Image (spheres, rainbow, N blue to C red):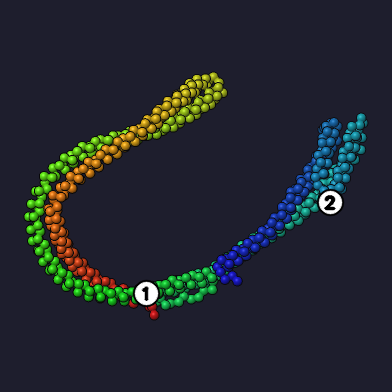
Amino acid sequence: MFKTIKQRILLGYLLVVIVSLIAAIVLTKNNANVENLVEAYVAETLPSLSAIDDIQTQSKELVLIAYSLYGTTISSREYNGQKDRLVDETNAKFSQFSYMGSDAAQEKFDVLVASAASLQQTMSATSIDWDIARENLQVITQAASELNALLTGVRSGVERAANSRTMAISAELSVSQFTIYSLIILLLAVSIMGYILAKRNIANPIEEMAKRLDDIAKTRNLQSRLPTQNLQELHAITHSVQGLLAVFHKGMTDLQHAVNDLNHSSQTLNSATSHSSTAILSFQGDIKQLVSVMDNLSDEMEQSLTLSIKAAEQAKGSAHQIAQGKVDVETTARAISDLTLNIDKTATTLDKLQSDGKNVSSVVKTIAEIADQTNLLALNAAIEAARAGESGRGFAVVADEVRTLASRTHQSTVEINAMLEKIVQSIRDSVQTMTSNKDKAHNALGLANELVITLEDGRKSVLSLVEVSNEASALVQHAKDQVQVAREGALDFQMLGDQVKAANTNVNSEAKSLFSLAENLQENVNRFKLS
């Protein structure tokens, strides 16, 4: 198991993934706990502390307005309005927290409110009883002091709860931090372990294999064997390299045998070229004697041929007249052929003209599309000018002129297309007519060629009569030609002998070079250790 590099790498990645998943689960859980604690702190603790501060402030303001009423610095009506506002705001603040002691604080505040109401009644009477007013003021002051002390105690409880939640958040963050540090340390450990294992199981064997291959390259010992590897990939590489060395070994062995055979063949070739040089020299002497005999025989036949030619010249006159008639007919045939070529060129020109007409139609179509687009742009410009009001009136006139010009252009392209269609149809009809004329011209040319053949047959008949009178001279000429051919063949043999001699010399030189090359190859092959 885990005998391959891929499997071991996969195992390492799986370990990293598993550790990362565990760390992610722990971090996710801690983050959820921290989020809950923070939400509770924000939703409960902070509003409660703010409400306590506001209640303490508002209770102090209530005492201050009570002293102001007692000191007659404010009226009873103003006092009643400020008191009701403070009471409503304070009751709203009491509803924002529910810590232990909040009910007792609510009761103390109710006592404070009742005392403030009693003070208002006393100060609102027709005859103010200042003793009762002072008692009411003392009750208000005492109730406010007790409420403040009670709220201070509640605030301490809230702060303790806040500190507890803060410590819990810090603990959760410490766990998350520890998890992250542990994950980093574990990943570093896995990386270091992977590096060590890769160096020991992959890098070191590869370096060892490279050293062995360098030693093989330096010593040229093709019988060396590479060490066996445990990992499948390295084992496959070792097996492939060993197979390559085996192929090199076999190739060098075969090359050594081939070099030995080459040495033997070059020696045999050198000996054969020496014998063939002697035979070629003897052959060249015989060829020279044969050429001399052929020259004498050719001179005698030349005299007989001159007498036979004079008798045949008169018969050739008639054949010449027939040949002149043939030339006239051929001139007519060439004229018909030229006419056919001109018709072909005209048909080609019409085809090109038809194609150009189609191209012009395409260009006109493009112009029509541009005119449509210009019309659309002019319409948009007119709309924008209308939106611009008075300032765009001049631009609207220009846009209207452009649109009119685009419409005229489009109408012109339609008319041009109609005319081009008629022109293209006319060209198409002309092409068909030219094709018919070309076929008729080809038929006339065929008839003229048949007449030329007929005249040629007549000329051949006359020449056959000439051949009867020239039979004797032809036989002499044939004999002379045969002698000349034989002489040329002898000269060719002589030239061939020279070429064979030169080639034999080159072969002898190449054989020596081949023998030297074989010795060099043998020396290079012997540097390798094959056995």
Task: Determine which of the numbered discs, if any, sits on residue 100 in the image.
Answer: 2
Residue 80 x %, y %: 85, 34
- Against 448, is 484 above or below? below
Please give the name of the residue rendered at 81% of the width and 47% of the height, measured from the top-left corner. 97
Q: Nearer the viewer, residue 482 or 498?
A: 482
Q: Quadrant of residue 106?
A: top right
- Against 468, is 374 above or below? above
Residue 333 x %, y %: 25, 37
Residue 475 appears anywhere in the view: yes
Number of numbered discs visible in the structure rendering: 2
Please give the name of the residue rendered at 45% of the width and 73% of the height, measured from the top-left corner. 242
What is the secondary structure assignment of the residue under circle 1? Answer: helix
Q: Is 350 on the left-hand or right-hand side of 377?
A: left
Residue 476 x %, y %: 12, 56
Q: Looking at the image, is mark 1 or mark 2 earlier in the sequence?
A: 2
Please give the name of the residue rendered at 89% of the width and 33% of the height, measured from the top-left corner. 123
Residue type beneath disc 2:
Met
Judge depth for marks 1 and 2 and give the one in front. Answer: 1
Q: Where is mark 1, residue-wise?
A: 254
- Against 128, is 104 above or below? below
Residue 126 x %, y %: 92, 30
Residue type beneath disc 1:
Asp
Please give the name of the residue rendered at 10% of the width and 59% of the height, measured from the top-left corner. 298
Q: Is 87 on the left-hand or right-hand side of 379?
A: right
Image quadrant where one finds the C terminus: bottom left
Q: CA distance from mark 1 to mark 2?
A: 104 Å
